[in-house]
Amino acid sequence: VGARAAAQGDQAGDNVSPGATPGNEPCFASYHNASRRTETVKIAIASGKGGTGKTTIATNLACSLAETGASVALIDCDVEEPNCHIFVKPVIETETQVTVQVPEVDKNLCTGCGICAQVCEYSAIVVIENEVLIFPELCHSCGACTLFCPENAIHEIERPVGLLESGASGTLKFCKGTLNIGEPMSPPVIKAVKDSAGSCDITIIDAPPGTSCPVIEAIKDTDFVLLVTEPTPFGLNDLELAVGMVRVLQIPFAVGVNRSDIGTNEVFHYCRDEGIDIVLEIPDDRTIAEAYSRGVMITGISEDYRDLFLSCWDRITFVMNHFEQ
């Protein structure tokens, strides 16, 4: 698919409008007739930077698919600032504390030998003058200190790091995680949210922005990643970083361009040159911004946008099938 788009783009030359990929229409003409997948599939919506429209796409795609009768779960893994609930307005049914294992030292058994500090790769334990100091925020719960303590003076205790909430919005299953204020590490909460999703035909994951550990935790083990960008220099720079990330992880992916009719053509040229499929283009529409500011789904203000997201899903399944072949 990407090769054909690139070939058509070469024929088109540089006469590319900001809202269209070279060769986009011929390349994607068959997507509208593609059969929607019925097997279980996990899709992550990610981006190299914040503010590109991940949540807008994740929520509207999930709700559009749920309205077709599919079994869909929306998982908000942007645990430092979750906001999918603002738009889908779920009824929260359960709340669960997310905890991690951290060491606790029995001073009656500890000899201050310092082995625990030597084996800790994260400097979460320091021994000064036979006194053991523990920094729980730095602990990665690896258990090495407990394993190697020659006096069995270390045991692990539960430490809360976040909150997991689950519920539903109509037929749409919903889960979100919220990292406790002041906590530096979000992956344990993200993992807990993903594990709570259960089994649905389609799982849509709203991933954190960027390309660091939280994003890796959110998108690993998914079947496909939709990278959201915007046609600006910053958007292109961070898209390149995100593309490098998913290629290293060897996860099939495509690109969605938000506010596609502003900025420059560089994002479109980059995707053409790299053979990357663009499966969604959302225009810079004031009504979208107004709906967003009120916490309203854009599929609720226009049937055309609902059809746009269903068409996006057809394109995603087409690209996934292409990768599998």
Image (cartoon, grey):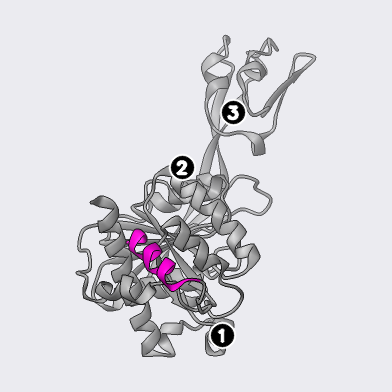
Which of the two labelled residues, at mark 3 and mark 2, occupies the earlier sequence position?
Answer: 3
The residue nearer to you, when weighing 266 against 70, is: 266
Q: Tell me the amino acid under the disc marked 2.
A: Val
Which of the two labelled residues, at mark 1 and mark 3, occupies the earlier sequence position?
Answer: 3
Q: Residue 54 in the image: state x and y as whole percent.
A: 51, 67
Q: The magenta stretch spans which residues?
A: 1-13
CA gap between label 3 and label 2 equals 34 Å
Residue 29 forms part of the magenta stretch: no
Q: Tell me the amino acid under the disc marked 1.
A: Arg
- Identified at 65% across, 46% down, the residue is 184
Pair 1/3: label in front: 1
- For label 1, the crowd category at 10 Å Cα-Cα, with few meaning under 14, some 14 to 19 and many 20 or more, is few
Label 1 belongs to which residue?
294
In the figure, residue 129 lies in which quadrant?
A: top right
**Is 49 located above or below residue 18 in the figure?**
above
- Residue 22's tag is none
Residues marked 2 and 1 touching at CB (< 8 Å): no
- Residue 103's tag is 3
Q: Is residue 215 visible?
A: yes
Residue 8 forms part of the magenta stretch: yes
The residue nearer to you, when weighing 22 against 44, is: 22
